[in-house]
Image: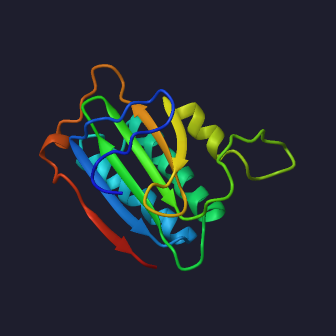
Amino acid sequence: MNNEIAAPSGNAQPISPAGHFAMRFSSTPRGARLARRLAGQRLDAWGIPYDCDAHRALTLIVGELAANAVRHGRVPGRDFRLALACGATTVRIEVTDTRTEGVPAVATPTDLRDTGRGLLLVERLADRWDWHPRRDGPGKTVWAQYVLPTGYRPTAALSCPSSTSTTVAL
C-alpha cells in the first residue's frame, strides 16, 4: 500500500485525508498494544483529545482490529500494518495482515467464551467497516470508518505531517 487510501469494497467511499499515519508492527500482543497507544497519540495530536468519546471509540476500534490481526492474521516473521487517515469529518482505520484464509465475520458471543466480541464492538462503534484482499501481496485489510460528531472538526489534522511510515519490531 502507499499513502493513498485504498478504495474499499461496498458502499464506503475513500476519504481525502488531512492527516495520515502508517506504521508496521510485530504480530505480537505487544505490537497490538503499541499500535493502539501510538494511534491514541496521533489522534490527540490531530485534535481528537484523549478525554472525548470519539477518541475512546477510535482507540477501541484500533485495539480490536490490531488484536485480530495478531490473533487471526499472524504469519510468523511477518508484521501487520496500521494506517490512520483523518479527514475533516471522518477517521479511517486500516489494519493489514498477511494471512489469506479466514474471512473476518462478526461472531455471536456466548457466555461460555471469553473471546469473539471484537468485530461486534467494531460494528457497533464504527459507521462502516469491511475488509478486502490485500492488493500488494498475500493477506487482507480490515478497515473501519468513524464519522466524527456533528460540529467536531480536528484542527491539528491540517498541520500534521502528511505521512509517517516505519516499522517497529518488538
Left or right: 26 in relation to 100: left
Left or right: 106 in relation to 34: right
At x 30%, y 28%, the residue is 89
In-front residue for pair 48/74: 74
Using the image, determine if residue 102 lies above or below residue 92. Answer: below
Task: Give coordinates of residue 16: x percent, y percent.
Answer: 25, 36
Give residue 15's quadrant in the image: top left
Q: Name the residue at the top extreme.
A: 150
Left or right: 170 in relation to 105: left
Task: Give coordinates of residue 124: x percent, y percent.
Answer: 58, 31
Using the image, determine if residue 35 lies above or below residue 54. Answer: below
Asked whether the viewer can see residue 131, the reply is yes
At x 29%, y 54%, the residue is 21
Task: Give coordinates of residue 166: x percent, y percent.
Answer: 30, 69
At x 30%, y 56%, the residue is 2
Task: Give coordinates of residue 164: x percent, y percent.
Answer: 24, 61
In-front residue for pair 64/92: 92
Give residue 152's quadrant in the image: top left
Q: Name the residue at the left extreme.
A: 159
Colouring scheme applied when the structure was drawn: rainbow
Q: Name the residue at the right extreme.
A: 112
In the rendered image, the quadrant that contains the N terminus is bottom left
Left or right: 149 in relation to 96: left
Asked whether the viewer can see residue 126, the reply is no
In-front residue for pair 93/117: 93
